[in-house]
Image (spheres, rainbow, N blue to C red):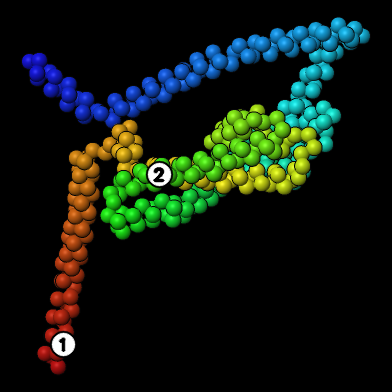
Amino acid sequence: MQSLAGSSCVRLVERHRSAWCFAFLVLGYLLYLVFGAVVFSSVELPYEDLLRQELRKLKQRFLEEHKCLSEQQLEQFLVRVLEASNYGVSVLSNASGNWNWDFTSALFFASTVLSTTGYGHTVPLSDGGKAFCIIYSVIGIPFTLLFLTAVVQRITVHVTRRPVLYFHIRWGFSKQVVAIIHAVLLGFVTVSCFFFIPAAVFSILEDDWNFLESFYFCFISLSTIGLGDYVPGEGYNQKFRELYKIGITCYLLLGLIAMLVVLETFCELHELKKFRKMFYVKKDKDEDQVHIMEHDQLSFSSITDQAAGLKEDQKQNEPFVAAQASTYSDGSANN
């Protein structure tokens, strides 16, 4: 009895294997979310508390030094300043020279909208700008996805599929092994060209950024997370700011294409395809066969009905044809 029950349980698990894998996937994702929340909270909460204490002390010291200014007036001024800062406008004297909506800045903003990066450092101020941003995004984001899909498909053929097939046919190496080695090398080249090298460049061009902060910006941008805490080209008296903004726009677009090519290359690996299929809904072969047989039966029955209808029409027309023939023969005999 125990062996029978065990075998039935095994059959039940095998029959619903995809559902069990999907359930474990959902559970693992939720646990990963909770894990991230715990780590971020434990790491960042002490720094937030220190910053709050520092700001409270600065505010109290400012009010003590300027007794003619009430706390309510100061808070009204700070609220207005923070509202303007959320729109990308600063009252600081060292930031008043940079316009947020000149052509190059607007081009950079449009690229972040279409790529769904959205740093949030610059946002539309007017109602017309907000309405246009909605319409522009509704049309532009699908257009961007179509553009990126077409570009990545063409690049993948020349960068991934043909080299793997060449080494497989020309040198006789295993296609799976060549694909894995190629994916790793392509990932290494992409990380070097679009993460490490740009991070070193940004750490030189941006005065307040170190290498870690620059690498952090590259990753947050090319993964389309776009937190907006680090935005290049916003420093005081940035040299060649217009050209710099155009270069950053080109870097973000090329980097996003490179990331998608690498992702597509890894997704085409045989091992990852098998792993992904564990969580997909599997089609029942018996159901497919039943549907095919039903379709064939319906097609056969419709053909049979059409043939029977044609025969009935021929039978109905036969007496009329015979009558015409007999009339014609009688007329000829009389003549």
- The CA span between labels 2 and 1 is 91 Å
Look at label 2 and name its amino acid. Ala
- Locate residue 200, reporting x and y percent: 61, 38
Residue located at (61% from left, 45% from top): 251
Residue 322 at x, y percent in the picture: 14, 76
Q: Residue at x 44, y 56 (%)?
A: 158
Check disc 2 and report its element: helix, strand or loop. Answer: helix
Residue furthest out toward the left: 1
| Corner quadrant of residue 28 | top left
Residue under label 1: 331
Q: Quadrant of the N terminus?
A: top left
| For residue 328, side relative to residue 200 (left or right) | left
**From this viewpoint, which residue is outermost toward the bottom?**
335
Disc nearest the viewer among 2 and 1: 2
Q: Is residue 80 above or below residue 194?
A: above
Q: Quadrant of residue 299?
A: bottom left
At label 1, counting other C-alpha atoms closer than 10 Å, the crowd grade (few under 14, some 14-19, many 20 or more) is few
Return the residue at label 2: 183
Counting residues from the start of the chain, the first of labels 2 and 1 encountered is: 2
Instruction: State the residue in front, 334 or 328.
Output: 328
Q: The C terminus is located in which quarter?
A: bottom left
Amino acid type, mark 1: Gly
The answer to whether residue 282 shows anywhere in this view is yes
- The x and y percentages for residue 88 are 74, 31
Using residue 283 as the reference point, say whether residue 87 is left or right of it.
right
Q: Judge whether residue 131 can be spotted in this image.
A: no
In this rendering, the answer to whether 280 lies above or below 68 is below
